Amino acid sequence: MSDRPEIGVLCLDTSFDKIPGHIRNPDTFDFPVRYRVVEGATPRRLVREADPTLLRPFVDAARDLEAAGVAGITGACGFLVLFQAELAAAVRVPLWSSSLVQLPMVHRMVGRPVGLLVADEAALTPRHLAAIGAADVPVAVTGMAGQPEFREVMLEGRRDALDVERLAAEVDERVDALARAHPGLGALVVECTDLVPFAHRIQARLGVPVFDIVTLTTMAYASLTRRPYRPAV
């Protein structure tokens, strides 16, 4: 049992394979994580329907994680950003619901439009961006809902086995299309936690900084576990 602080993760009710790089694969991090699945919180209800009745069970789950002693809480779906204010107010530990929380910072860092790779482009609304103060950030959005592997496994839950190479090719296709349509992007934020395992491929194709829920969680963990500086030997 590790005595290092844990990060809690609010999870959707899904059962497909979570490969290394996914926030729900504990090997993704070099610090301990504690998962809390919210039963009935399907991708359809959160992503496509923005079901407001999900707020209460996510608040309860966040409070459960806090009671378990986690140092901070994050989410395993970027569309949780819609509940960012309510979730953060419900607990006394830092809570970052989505990789999109980084968006205003990223734009200020690069001074150019920021690409967004999301689960479902049609489901991303101005409300999601306004929830984290990014309503005025210039973005270029592409989504995965039209890609068969992503749609069948992640959005519709037809099967648990994931064809990683097929999904990687779908990510490549969407990123390449985004680059052709918007050649001046300064960075890209991956909204969807299912796509983080392909962040290295995205960066190789775009040649810009790539941010996601793992970059945000790693930064937040560092802020929660400061250590004294020691002189080099």
Image (cartoon, grey):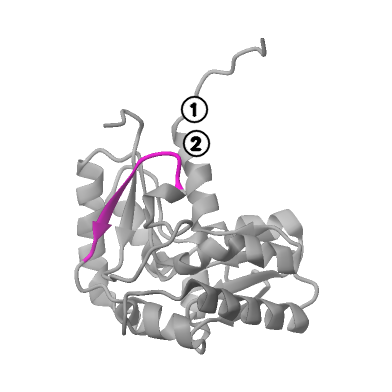
Name the residue type under label 2.
Ser
Which label number is shown at residue 223?
2
In the rendered image, is residue 144 in sight? yes
Residue 111 has which mark?
none
Q: Residue at x 21, y 41 (%)?
A: 68
Q: Residues within 10 Å of mark 2 (few under 14, many from 20)?
A: few
The image shows residue 10 at horizontal and vertical percentages of 31, 58
The spot of residue 150 in percent (x, y) is: 46, 80
- Give the position of the N terminus as an image quadrant: top left
Residue, x 45% and y 68% (percent of image)? 194
Q: Are marks 1 and 2 in contact (CB under 8 Å)?
A: yes
- Residue 30 part of the magenta-drawn span: yes
Image location of residue 92, percent across then percent down: 31, 43
Q: CA distance from mark 1 to mark 2?
A: 6 Å
x%, y% of residue 175?
Answer: 66, 76
Give the structural element (helix, strand or loop) at label 2. helix
Picture quarter containing residue 110?
A: bottom right
Q: Is residue 186 above or below residue 4?
A: below
